Amino acid sequence: MRGTALAAALGAAAVLGIQGMAGGAELTAAPGGEGAAKAYSADAKETGPVEGELHKLALQPKGAGEAVLSRQETQPFGLLGVSWTDPAAELKGTIEARSRDAETGAWSKWIALDPVKPGMDGVRPGAHGSTEPVWVGASNGAEVRISGGGALPAGLELNLVDPGGSAAQAKQGGQKKNAAQKGGAARTAALQAAPAASAATTIDPGPASTAPQPAVVSRAAWGADESLNNEGPLYQTSGKIKAVFVHHTADTQPYDCSQSAAIVRGIHVYHVQTNGWRDLGYNFLVDKCGTIFEGRQGGIDQAIIGAHTFGWNTDTEGIAVLGDYNAGGASAAAQDAVSRIAAYKLGQYDGDMNGTTTLTAGATQTNFFGTAFEVGKQYQFKTLSGHRDGFNTECPGNQLYAQLGSLRASGPAAQLKVGTVNGVPVQPGVDATSDGVLTVGWSTSTASDRIGSFEVLVDGVPAATASGTARTATSIVTSGTHEVQVKANAVNGKTSTTLPVKVVSEVKPAKFTPVTPKRLMDTRSGLGGVPQAKVGAGGTVTLPVAGTNGIPAAGVTAVVLNVTATGPTEPSYVSVFPSGTTRTSASNLNFTPGQTIPNLVVVPMVDGKVSFFNNQGTVDLIADVTGYFTSAGDGATHTNIGPKRLMDTRAGLGVPQGKVGAGGVVTLPVAGTNGIPATGVTAVVLNVTATNPTEPSFVSVYPSGTTRTSASNLNFTPGLTIPNLVVVPVVDGKVSFFNNQGTVDLIADVTGYFTSAGDGASHTNIGPKRLMDTRAGLGVPQGKVGAGGVVTLPVAGTNGIPATGVTAVVLNVTATNPTEPSFVSVYPSGTTRTSASNLNFTPGQTIPNLVVVPVVDGKVSFFNNQGTVDLIADITGYFSK
């Protein structure tokens, strides 16, 4: 005997003693198979329930406490054990058996069989006394001897289980057929390991888990003969699983993983037909290849009472690893499988695999370590325990038991839950609220050093990312009802996700207030309270905006900045994003060494500041404010117009024909022209393009009738054509354009205006969020836009943008990888494209520009003039009535 452990196996469905054997035939696969396969391997041509067969052979008493089954040929079998009539009768002494290999005819060594004590699956009529079952592989002969035990119980029998469904059965006179085959059904060999719903269709789905449900081979897939189970499952009265006990099946016989389903079927048949249990004892079984099998019926997602750990089956589940793990440990694949299924089950009930819990003893007994338990009393257990922690058994083997410590720390973040939304504790059944800013707080019992990062998910889409040490993150949400979760990404690659919290967001539309363009930040001089130094690779500078330079301290939802990158040392990009939130993949400026690139940015405000991130190299950054949006107080609403060309110095449109000289100014009348009202206009939205410059220079666009400030809008060098969106206040009905050096042609296309009349559209923040990327096929088909080509992007009704009422969207559009000099026009789908352009570029350039484009049919179109180019679009907000 292998000691007290197995001999005292009192636990419900205690240790399945699958012992070492020399047998286990390797047979040639049936026609159509792939090479050699062991008997009882999965057969690729079969599907449906597999009818196993149980053969019983009576042992012959010899007196003096001895009994035998003489060596003899038998029906084919793969698993054996000895049983007797009275489960309360004690069989003392040594019980040994051996088998004959069905292929070679060789007899195995003698194997000691350990008795299972009664009460494994409760007190049941018709239950038998028995030993643990032993998997021996394909065999067709057996021998048993019992000695040294005094009086023997009545009804001693050898039980031989043929689990059926083998690829090549060892049976004289032809291949054995199972019931499904006899009925003409075909069986598929591939075991479908996939998440399965509850087997009991009348039972509500089990609770969601913070850990993902791993792939599990269902009872149907491994061929469970459900005709053996006519009682139905038993559900935990508490409806909870508080702990998981790990077992092994003590099988020292090597097995091929294609045989695992047959082994599980053999255990099932033995537990029901020999032991008289209601079903297979374990809740789950795992093989050395990491395949997880559904054990006791009732549903993978349900809290099922198993028969695995005597006295501790209440509020627990049992996972058995196929094999013997006294001499060697379980494979990495098996350990990972145990970790995943245990994390899933415990995650359904807010359990921590690396924690502790309290269980109530169901029996008075002593465990393997000599710890005494008294029925009805509570005791503390590790949430992931070994069988021997609750019972006097060697199970799950010395080596697997030693691996439980690392297994406990192998799962995803545990007890992960959202605690607060915008500082308010989450209450069951109570919706959280938001005004557009979403600050989520969470907790977990897992140490921070085991977590790589967290993600805040809004409707299943990542909205913010935080470090493994963080417990809060802020993002922006649109109006409407959202499901908010937090996902933890553990260092070991495993993930867990909180249960969803419903957040109802009501974002107040904002109106625009223009301000005279004014420089707020310049890293070259340290203006704005930022360090006087270039922004380094991966560096971020943060600029206080609210409460400065005439911008209100509260109520500001977004600020409009003209941001310029100058003096870059490497190709890079800059992202401008709300301080206090996680930066997204959206970029605002793209540049190469030697360039000076401007771009208008409409950036939401969360904590009153704006952050600027540089990806590579070093670069100086400049920011000029042109206005802000506010949901409090008066402001202007937006009205679409255009895109329509108002000015072109090359043709004398709107202003005199001729380049603008050094220090020169041209002034464009806007109010009362081209559909723009004569009064009430507070600002116009213009796409301004500088082309044919003769010297490095900059252009400033400012309200006519005011003194020009140091703010600039376009920066360029000879040979470049540079566009930039400008939101410029209107003071005397005109807009002025100043050129610093050399000569340059200027073009201005109007896309809309802001009016104090209040009958226009209000602005709502969203993003920054990437909507389109032709490189990846995001939003539009994957592939560059060709010469004369158009791609059309749906916007209304997507990504939190309302399906109706949207008058315009604010997009940061980037052109990259162009093959020829060209331009891109962004215009309302459903309309005729005008001559207005938004981006101009040459091969090798990456050029961004902000676009405020009207929405007519819910879509936006992008036209490329020549060559091919990739286009990217990030949304920052929209206008709606």
Image: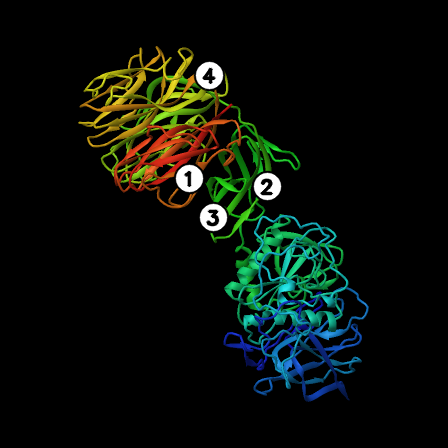
Is mark 3 in CB contact (under 8 Å) with mark 4?
Answer: no
Q: Does the image show residue 449?
A: yes
Specify which label sits upstream in the sequence, 2 or 3.
Answer: 3
Three-letter code, disc 2: Pro
Specify which label sits upstream in the sequence, 4 or 2.
Answer: 2
- Viewer-side label of 1, 2: 1
Q: Nearer the viewer, residue 294 or 670?
A: 670
Q: CA distance from mark 4 to mark 1?
A: 31 Å
Specify which label sits upstream in the sequence, 1 or 3.
Answer: 3
Residue at the farthest right position: 125
- Identify residue for label 1: 772
Q: Nearer the viewer, residue 529 or 858?
A: 858
Q: CA distance from mark 3 to mark 4?
A: 49 Å
- Identify residue for label 2: 500
Secondary structure beneath label 2: loop
319 relative to 727 in the view: left or right? right
